[in-house]
Image: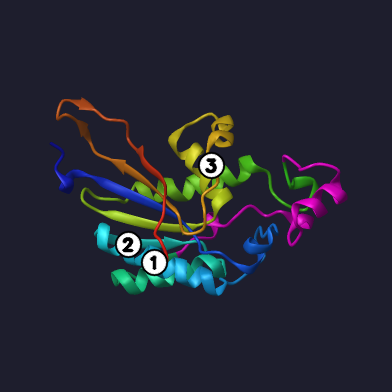
Amino acid sequence: MVDPAEIRRIILLRHGVTPWNAEGRYQGQTDIELAETGHQQAKAAARVLGATFDVTRLVASDLKRARQTAAYVSEETGREVSYDPRLREVRAGEAEGMVRAEILERFGEMPTSWEPYGGESWPTVATRFSAAIHDVAGSVEPGETVVVVAHGGAIRQGLAAFLGWDPAVVTTLAPLTNCAWIELVARDFAHGILPAAPWRLATYGTGAPIS
């Protein structure tokens, strides 16, 4: 039996829906606010997270949609938010604000890197995001739960890098819906005898219905 007091936990929460999400527009680091539905999603997710976990710390991307989502978790848990720009979404350069059809018309294909268009590569995103999560992980004590509020693409890339997966694994992960979350857990020993994997994926894509 695992003692809950031994478990260290990180929750990676995607922000609520924005008008550009609803229109299928690539947001990147354009600072879009939540849509009304996004506020409802964030409030519902915060309520479930607050009731399910003893949240001890809250970290978020500094973009508005993540800040607004984190504010609901802060209100529900009583924890102040700290902000880390390393948790931002990929910078998509010239593609920001475009829908997929416009990107295909402009570039002829969906680029595998936004670097040639004034943006970032996915490996760059994975490196900065996973570095932020490593910093969080290094300070989580047994029994603590840290909620990290960020962005769908960056979360998947950063998750793979943080867990040491081959980058190709990212293509097998379903996109996170708005305000869905991922749970990572760690404990120092497996069955009290052998060292456990430092961090493991416990749940993926959990969400909360809007009431």
Q: Tell me what residue is drawn at x 37 percent, y 57 percent.
A: 147
Quadrant occupied by the C terminus: bottom left
Q: Which residue is mark 3?
A: 174
Instruction: Locate residue 172, reporting x and y percent.
Output: 55, 34
Sequence-wise first label, 3 or 2: 2
Say whether residue 155 is left or right of residue 30. Answer: left
Frontmost residue, 146 versus 208: 208
Query: Magenta residues?
Result: 83-112
Which comes before the other along the chain, label 1 or label 3?
1
Q: Is residue 75 visible?
A: yes
Give me the C-alpha separation between circle 1 and circle 3: 22 Å
Residue at disc 3, secondary structure: loop
- What is the crowding at mark 1: few (fewer than 14 residues within 10 Å), some, or many (at least 20)? many
CA distance for labels 3 and 2: 22 Å
Expressed as whole percent of the image width and height from the top left, the position of residue 165 reads: 49, 31
**Residue at label 2?**
48
- Callout 3: few (<14), some (14-19), or many (20+) C-alpha neighbours within 10 Å? few
- The amino acid at mark 2 is Val
Q: Which mark is residue 44?
A: 1
